C-alpha cells in the first residue's frame, strides 16, 4: 500500500488542515455576527422566503428541515466550536472515523449556510471553502499517512483557481492585455485596505510589472504544481508570495488565504522539519472510501475543465448543488471609476434646503474621506461588499437597499450593528437618503494640504429622502435587538 500515501506530504497535509480550520473559524464567526441581520427571519433577504420558492435539490441545506434565527445561531456556533477544536489539533487525537466526521460536519453546516445565503454568499471564495472542505474530510489524521490522490486533488483545485483567474483576465478586459489594469484596480477594488492608496500611487511602470508578474503566476506557474519536487515547491512558493502581495494590497475576504493554504500543502517541508512520523494507509474502508471520492471528483471535474478552455468561460460557477468541483476567476473586467453610496439621515420633520444631514459610517467601505481604509480580511463584511456592487447598478437591481433604508428608519438593532457609526444613537431619523459620490485616492500633495485620503465628488441623488411611512411594511418591519 505504499502507493496510497506519501511521507513527504505529511507536513503539507498538517499545514493545510490547520489553515483550513482557521478559515472555517472565521467564516462561521461571520455568520454568527451578520447572518441574522442579512438573512434572518426579518433580515434584508429572509431565508424563509428563499426556502419557500427554491426546492431542496437546488440548494441542499439543513435549514429545509427547520429555520429560525435561534437554530442558525446553533449551527454557526457549532461550526465555531468544531473548527476551533480542529485548529487546536483535536483531529489528530481522536479515532480516524471521528476526525472525518468532524470535518464532514463542518462541510455540511457551511454548505447549508452558503446554499441559502443568496446574494450575500454569492462569492467565489464560498464555493472554494466548500470544495476544499469536502476534500479535507478524506485527508485522514495523524493515524494514517497523507493520501497521495487527495493531496493531488488539492493541487488540481489550486490549478483551477489560479489558471482560471488568469484565463478570465486574458479573455476579459483589454487592460489586462495592455498591462494597464493596475492603473485603476487598487483604487476601484471592492474593499481597499490600509496600503491600497500607496499601491495605487506607485509609478505606472511598476503597475505594468505587477500585471506581467500576475500573468506569469496565473498562466505559467500553475503547471509547475504537477512537476516533481522541488519544482512543485518552487511553483507553490511563487503562488504563495504573490497571494501575500494581494493580501497587503486589498481585502478579499479569505480568497487569498485559501490560495495560500492550498499552495502550502504542495511544499515539501522535510528538508526543514525532518522526516514525518511513519504511518500506514489506514483501514481498508478508508482506502476504499478515498478511492471512490477521487473517482467522483475526477468525473465531476469534466465540466469545470472544459469551462477553462471555453471561449465563453464562466467565472465562479458551481455545476452541482453540493459545490464539489467548481470554476473560479476574478476581475475579468476592472472598474475604472469608483462610485460609492453614502447614506445620510436627519431628524427634521420635513427636509429642505437648510436641512443638516448626518452620515452613517460603514465598517469597511470608503465613507469619511479622512479615514484610513481598515484591514479586515480574512474577515468578510458582506454588507460593505454589496454596497460596492449597488453603486455600479440602477436602484431596481438591488431592492435590498430600500429594505436597508427602512431598517435604519425603524432603528433595527441587528442591522445597525453591521455599521461602524450610527449618527442617531438615541432615536431613529425621520428621513434617510442615499447619495452617489465618485471617489478617488488623493495624491501626495492633496493629502498634505487637506489630510484626506480620498477626494469625493457628488454625482447624483441615488435615493431621495424617504420616511418610514413611505416604506412598504416588509421593508420597515421593526424588531427589538
Image (tube, rainbow, N blue to C red):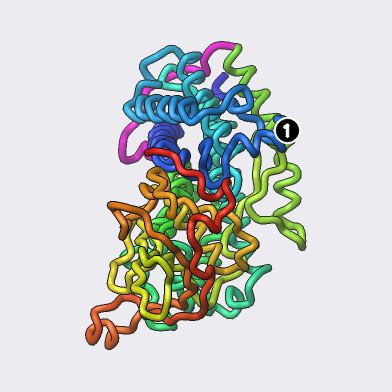
Residue at numbered disc 1: 55
Question: Does the magenta stretch mainly form a helix, a strand or a loop?
Answer: loop
**Is the residue 246 above or below the residue 277 in the image?**
below
**In the rendered image, which quarter is residue 297 located in?**
top right
Left or right of 309: which side holds 351?
left
Was residue 180 drawn as part of the magenta stretch in this picture? no
* Residue for point 40% across, 32% down: 14
List the single residue furthest toward the front. Answer: 349
Asked whether 201 or 375 is in front, the reply is 375
* Residue for point 57% across, 32% down: 112
Asked whether 39 or 310 is in front, the reply is 39
- What is the magenta range? 269-284
Left or right of 378: which side holds 397?
right
Q: Is residue 268 visible?
A: no
Left or right of 410: which side holds 3?
right
Image quadrant for the N terminus?
top right
Q: Secondary structure at mark 1?
A: loop
**In the rendered image, which quarter is residue 24 located in?**
top left
* Residue for point 64% across, 17% down: 288
**Is the residue 288 above or below the residue 433 in the image?**
above
In the image, residue 262 lies at what x, y percent? 48, 43
In the image, residue 111 lies at what x, y percent? 57, 33
In the image, residue 80 lies at what x, y percent? 39, 30
Asked whether 153 or 339 is in front, the reply is 339
Q: Residues within 10 Å of mark 1 (few under 14, many from 20)?
A: few
**Is the residue 194 above or below the residue 176 in the image?**
above
Amino acid at each position: 500500500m505504499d502507493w496510497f500515501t506519501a511521507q513527504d506530504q505529511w507536513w503539507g497535509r498538517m499545514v493545510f488542515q490547520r489553515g483550513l480550520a482557521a478559515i472555517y473559524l472565521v467564516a462561521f464567526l461571520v455568520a454568527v455576527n451578520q447572518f441574522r441581520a442579512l438573512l434572518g427571519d426579518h433580515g434584508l433577504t429572509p431565508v424563509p422566503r428563499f426556502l419557500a420558492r427554491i426546492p431542496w435539490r437546488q440548494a441542499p441545506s439543513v435549514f429545509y428541515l427547520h429555520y429560525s434565527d435561534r437554530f442558525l445561531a446553533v449551527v454557526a456556533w457549532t461550526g465555531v466550536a468544531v473548527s476551533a477544536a480542529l485548529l487546536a489539533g483535536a483531529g489528530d487525537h481522536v479515532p480516524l472515523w471521528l476526525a472525518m466526521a468532524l470535518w464532514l460536519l463542518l462541510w455540511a453546516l457551511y454548505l447549508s449556510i452558503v446554499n441559502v445565503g443568496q446574494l450575500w454568499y454569492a462569492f467565489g471564495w464560498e464555493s472554494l471553502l466548500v470544495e476544499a472542505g469536502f476534500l479535507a474530510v478524506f485527508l485522514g489524521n495523524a493515524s494514517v499517512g497523507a493520501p497521495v490522490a487527495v493531496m493531488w486533488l488539492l493541487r488540481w483545485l489550486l490549478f483551477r483557481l489560479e489558471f482560471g483567474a488568469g484565463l478570465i483576465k486574458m479573455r476579459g478586459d483589454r487592460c489586462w492585455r495592455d498591462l494597464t489594469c493596475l492603473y485603476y484596480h487598487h483604487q476601484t477594488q471592492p474593499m481597499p485596505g490600509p496600503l491600497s492608496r500607496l499601491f495605487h500611487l506607485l509609478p505606472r511602470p511598476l503597475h505594468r510589472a505587477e500585471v506581467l508578474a500576475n500573468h506569469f503566476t496565473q498562466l505559467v506557474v500553475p503547471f509547475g504544481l504537477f512537476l516533481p519536487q522541488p519544482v512543485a515547491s518552487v511553483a507553490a512558493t511563487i503562488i504563495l508570495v504573490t497571494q501575500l502581495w494581494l493580501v497587503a494590497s486589498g481585502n478579499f475576504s479569505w480568497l487569498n488565504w485559501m490560495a495560500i493554504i492550498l499552495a502550502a500543502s504542495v511544499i515539501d517541508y522535510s528538508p526543514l522539519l525532518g522526516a514525518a512520523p511513519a504511518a500506514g494507509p489506514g483501514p481498508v474502508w478508508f482506502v476504499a472510501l478515498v478511492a471512490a471520492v477521487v473517482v467522483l471528483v475526477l468525473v465531476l471535474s469534466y465540466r469545470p475543465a472544459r469551462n477553462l478552455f471555453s471561449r465563453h468561460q464562466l467565472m465562479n460557477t458551481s455545476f452541482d448543488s453540493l459545490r464539489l468541483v467548481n470554476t473560479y476567476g476574478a476581475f475579468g473586467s476592472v472598474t475604472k471609476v469608483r462610485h460609492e453610496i453614502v447614506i445620510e439621515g436627519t431628524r427634521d420633520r420635513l427636509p429642505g434646503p437648510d436641512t443638516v444631514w448626518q452620515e452613517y459610517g460603514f465598517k469597511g467601505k470608503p465613507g469619511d474621506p479622512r479615514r484610513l481604509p481598515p484591514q479586515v480580511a480574512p474577515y468578510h463584511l458582506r454588507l460593505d461588499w454589496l454596497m460596492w456592487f449597488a453603486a455600479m447598478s440602477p436602484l431596481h437591481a438591488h431592492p435590498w437597499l430600500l429594505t436597508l433604508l427602512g431598517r435604519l428608519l425603524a432603528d433595527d438593532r441587528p442591522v445597525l450593528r453591521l455599521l461602524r457609526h450610527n449618527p442617531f444613537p438615541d432615536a431613529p431619523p425621520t428621513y434617510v437618503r442615499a447619495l452617489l459620490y465618485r471617489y478617488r485616492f488623493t495624491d501626495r500633495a492633496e493629502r498634505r494640504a487637506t489630510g484626506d485620503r480620498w477626494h469625493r465628488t457628488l454625482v447624483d441623488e441615488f435615493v431621495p429622502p424617504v420616511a418610514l411611512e413611505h416604506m412598504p411594511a416588509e421593508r420597515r418591519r421593526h424588531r427589538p435587538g
